[in-house]
């Protein structure tokens, strides 16, 4: 999996676990020690790409 796929799959999983709340998802990711592959993807992706993924996950329609 590439960085974008790793980031997207983790965000989707956390978003579902956090009752589809974007605010709770962001807080969870900020406070937890996430897996190394996610941290690597987070560092390597641009802010624009991360924002696009967050938007796509939170507004799937």
Image: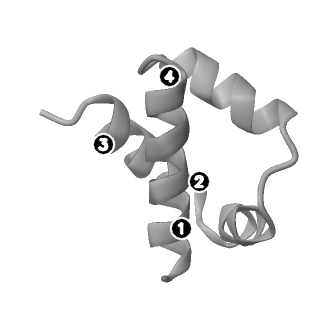
- How far apart are the two marked residues, 3 and 2, measured between alpha carbons? 14 Å
Label 3, on which residue?
Answer: 56
Residues at badges 3 and 4 in contact (C-beta under 8 Å)? no
Q: Residue at position x 80%, y 68% from top?
A: 36
Mark 1 is surrounded, within 10 Å at the Cα level, by few (under 14), some (14 to 19) or many (20 or more) other residues, namely: some
Residue 22's x, y, as percent?
50, 22
Disc 2 is placed on an element classified as: helix
- How far apart are the two marked residues, 2 and 1, measured between alpha carbons? 15 Å
Residue 8's x, y, as percent?
45, 56
- How far apart are the two marked residues, 3 and 4, measured between alpha carbons? 11 Å
Mark 2 is surrounded, within 10 Å at the Cα level, by few (under 14), some (14 to 19) or many (20 or more) other residues, namely: few
Label 1, on which residue?
Answer: 6
Which image quadrant for residue 14? top right
Q: Residue pushed farthest front?
A: 17
- How far apart are the two marked residues, 3 and 1, measured between alpha carbons? 15 Å
Label 4, on which residue?
Answer: 22
Mark 4 is surrounded, within 10 Å at the Cα level, by few (under 14), some (14 to 19) or many (20 or more) other residues, namely: some
Residues at badges 2 and 1 in contact (C-beta under 8 Å)? no
- The mark found on residue 47 in the picture is 2
- How far apart are the two marked residues, 4 and 2, measured between alpha carbons? 16 Å
Q: Residue pushed farthest left?
A: 61
| Nearest to N terminus: mark 1 or mark 4 | 1
């Amino acid at each position: 999996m590439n960085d974008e796929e790793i980031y997207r799959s983790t965000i989707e999983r956390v978003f579902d676990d956090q009752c589809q709340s974007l605010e709770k998802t962001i807080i969870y990711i900020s406070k937890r020690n996430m897996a190394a592959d996610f941290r690597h993807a987070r560092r390597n992706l641009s802010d624009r790409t991360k924002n696009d993924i967050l938007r796509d996950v939170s507004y799937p329609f």
